[in-house]
Amino acid sequence: MTEVAMSALTGEGSSDRTKRADALRNIEAIIDAATRLLAVNPDASINQIAKAADVGRVTLYGHFESRATLIRAVTDRAIAQTNEALAQLDLDGDPREVLGRLLEATWHLTHRFGAVVVAGARELPPEQLRRAHDEPAARVRGLLERGRAVGEFRSDVPIDWQLTVIQSILHGASAAVHRGDLDEVDAPSLVRDTTLAALAARAPARGDASGPSTPGV
């Protein structure tokens, strides 16, 4: 069926289609602008977002009834795009090498979305926010478990602590780039090398090569 015939059946004319297309463009512009601003400043105002999107406040509120609604939309899209990007990575192979690649990919996404996570944490229910982190955390946890099992990563500290360290390094590097303390080009390798060094299994101390001593010997 042609577009003209479909319009005749639905009663939608060219003017309606134009308005709908304009609305979709405005929505996309608003979400893009909000993502850029919130990534740097989680307190970015509606006025600032509307200006960056080149729309008026009335137009913005016509699509998003509140700042909280807009932030939820931005956060949902950031989570979806992050999961989609990381799901494409091949996680087979040496756990240390694979985790290095995953860290670099995660860094780019963390830096792109930056403080959007902070803004989302203020607006999303805790349970929804926790679920949003479950899938990325599960990938890293699986690699940590594999690496610990073969002696690549330390197993003398809780795995949850290792996950916390990784998140801290990623977000710390993103904040440093935004402040101008770290060159964006250098960040991925620094994140990778710093994290892998923190996770690396420690060499046995001198005298421990033969294993633990037997009591009474």
Image (tube, grey):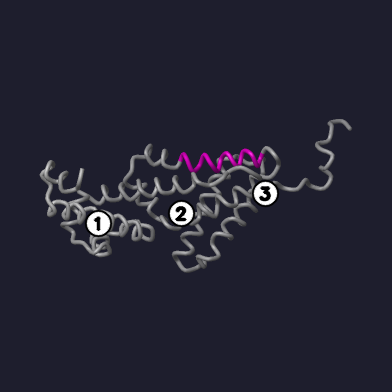
Q: Report, in whole angstroms, how far the alpha carbon at label 3 lies from the one at label 1.
A: 48 Å
Asked whether the residues under the numbered discs 3 and 1 touch, taking CB atoms below 8 Å apart as contact, a structural biologist would say no
x 28%, y 55%: residue: 28
Pointer 3: what residue? Answer: 200
| 95 relative to 2 in the view: left or right | right
Is residue 183 shown in magenta?
A: no
Disc 1 packing (10 Å; few <14; some 14–19; many ≥20): few
Pointer 1: what residue? Answer: 25
x 53%, y 41%: residue: 139
x 51%, y 52%: residue: 168
Q: Mark 3 against mark 1, which lies toward the viewer?
A: 1
Residue 175: percent from left, percent from top: 46, 60
Disc 3 packing (10 Å; few <14; some 14–19; many ≥20): some
Magenta region, main secondary structure: helix
Which element is circle 3 on? loop
Residue 130, quarter of picture: top left
Which element is circle 2 on? helix
Residue 22: percent from left, percent from top: 20, 56
Q: Earlier in the sequence, mark 3 or mark 2?
A: 2
Magenta-drawn segment:
134-148
Amino acid tagged 3: Ala
Up/down of 76 relative to 59, above or below: above
Amino acid tagged 2: Leu
> Which disc is residue 109 wearing?
2
